[in-house]
Image (tube, rainbow, N blue to C red):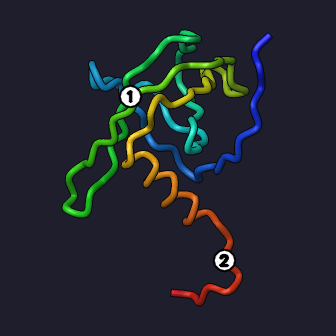
Amino acid sequence: MPIQRRIERHQLPYYLKVFNRVTDKPMGYIGNISREGLMLISPWPMLVLAEFDMRLKIPGRDGQPHHIDFSATCRWTREDVTPGSFDSGFALIDPPAEYLGLVEVLRHYFTFHPNASPA
C-alpha cells in the first residue's frame, strides 16, 4: 500500500505545461506544486517509480521562454475525475534553484498579506 504524505501545496488558477526534456513533447500540466514535488495532470497514466526528465517553459521578461529543467520520480498515479485525464504525484530529485525560486514566487503570489498596501 502506498504511503500518503501530507505536504503543503498551493493550487494554481491555471496550469503550467510540463514537457519531456528529452523529446520536448508535452506531458501534461501542473495541478499543484511544492518544494518537494508536484502533481501532473495528463492524458496518460505515468509509470510509477520511473524517473522522468522534465522541463517547464516560463515566459521571460524578453518574451522568450525560460526553461526550468528538473528530474522527478513518479510516486503514484490515478484516474482524474475528468474523463480521459490522470493525476500523477512526483517527488523531485535534487530540485534546481530555478524550480525552488518558482515555488517561492508562486507561494508569495498566493499568500494572503493582510498588511500589504494595494499596488
* Residue pictured at 51% horizontal, 57% vertical: 104
Q: Is residue 91 shown above or below 113?
A: above
Residue 31 position by quadrant: top right
Q: Secondary structure at mark 2?
A: loop
Give the spatial CA distance, label 1 vs label 2: 32 Å
Name the residue type under label 2: His
Q: x, y (%) of residue 11?
A: 64, 49
Can you say whether 57 is above or below 4 in the image? below
Q: Where is 31 relative to 3, above or below?
A: below
Label 1 element class: strand
From the viewer's perspective, tell me whether residue 1 is left or right of residue 69. right
Taking the spot 53% from the left edge, 24% from the top edge, the residue there is: 42
Q: Quadrant of residue 83?
A: top right
Number of residue marks: 2
Residue lying at the far front of the rendered structure: 94
Q: Is residue 53 above or below residue 67?
A: above
For the residue marked with disc 1, what is the amino acid? Met
Numbered mark located on residue 96 in the image? none
Q: Measured from the top left, where is residue 67 in percent x and y?
A: 28, 42
Expressed as whole percent of the image width and height from the top left, the position of residue 88 reads 60, 23
* Residue 33, picture quadrant: top right
Extreme residue in the bottom direction:
117
Packing grade of label 1 (10 A; few <14, some 14-19, many >=20) is: many
Write down the residue under mark 1: 54
> What residue sits 51% from the left and 51% below the top?
103
Number of other residues with Cα within 10 Å of mark 2, as a class: few under 14, some 14 to 19, many 20 or more: few
Disc 1 + disc 2, Cβ < 8 Å: no
Please give the residue where the numbered disc 2 appears in the rendered image: 113
Q: Which quarter of the rendering shows the N terminus? A: top right
In the rendered image, residue 62, in percent from the top left (x then y), is placed at 19, 62
Earlier sequence position, callout 1 versus callout 2: 1
Residue displayed at 31% across by 26% down: 21
